[in-house]
Amino acid sequence: MAHRLVWDYILKFIIIGDASVGKSSLLVRLTEDRFLVDSDTTIGIEFGSQIVTLPKGERLKLQIWDTAGSEQFRSVWTAIVLTRQITRSYYKGAAGCLLVYDVTERETFNHVLSWLRDVREQADEHATIALVGNMADLPSTERSVTTEEGAALAQEHGQASVFMSI
């Protein structure tokens, strides 16, 4: 007896960025459509999935991977000989990457180019990258990165830009 899959295609997306920019909250919003009130620091990798139906009826299963954003965990991973293989497996097969920064924390925006370099070195050359400015609902007096700066950086590097609040 043949079993029919609940989806037609699987696409993998990864969420990267500095610690505490909202990556885990974004994962929960995308996969469970709920607001994550409190979140512990991600250690390693967390996963979620969501099935989306396209207008023509095809069903996509989106696998979304969230990883530790802390430099502490990045450096621990890079200190291990097998890290390159682990890192490659994280990026391998990703159709897209959501690179998240916090518009209220300039330092997270300053690290975007380092994250972009990681993606370009590790991910498939055809992977779509979107820069995601989180906390975008806050007034300009509370922001340290303007919408224009985020959009300009994305455009300069050929990436899409999205601004949101989770």
Image: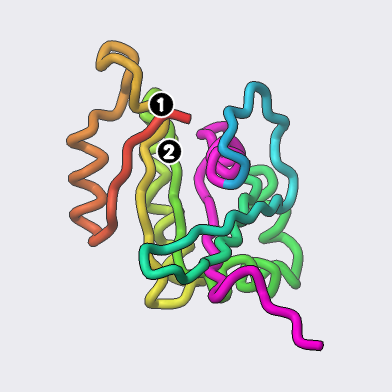
Horizontal side, residue 71 vs residue 104: left or right? right
Residue 118 screen position, x and y as percent: 48, 62
Quadrant occupied by the N terminus: bottom right
Q: Secondary structure at mark 2?
A: strand
The residue that label 1 is drawn on is 135
Q: Earlier in the sequence, mark 2 or mark 1?
A: 2
- Count the numbered circles shown: 2
User: How far apart are labels 2 and 1 at the CA level?
Assistant: 9 Å
- Give the residue drawn at x 50%, y 58%: 52
At label 2, the amino acid type is Tyr
In the image, residue 134 above or below residue 118: above
Q: Position of residue 145 (x, y in %)?
A: 29, 29
Label 1 packing within 10 angstroms: few (<14), some (14-19), many (20+): many
Q: Amino acid at mark 1?
A: Met
Which is nearer the eye, 84 or 100? 100
Residue closest to the eye, 66 or 31 = 31
Q: From what the image shows, is residue 81 above or below residue 30?
A: below
Residue interval drawn in magenta: 1-30
Q: Is residue 8 magenta?
A: yes
Q: Nearer the viewer, mark 2 or mark 1?
A: 1
- Is residue 155 or residue 32 the one in the foreground? 32
Residue at 45% from the left image edge and 52% from the top image edge = 98
Q: Where does label 2 land, which residue?
A: 101
Residue for point 36% across, 29% down: 103
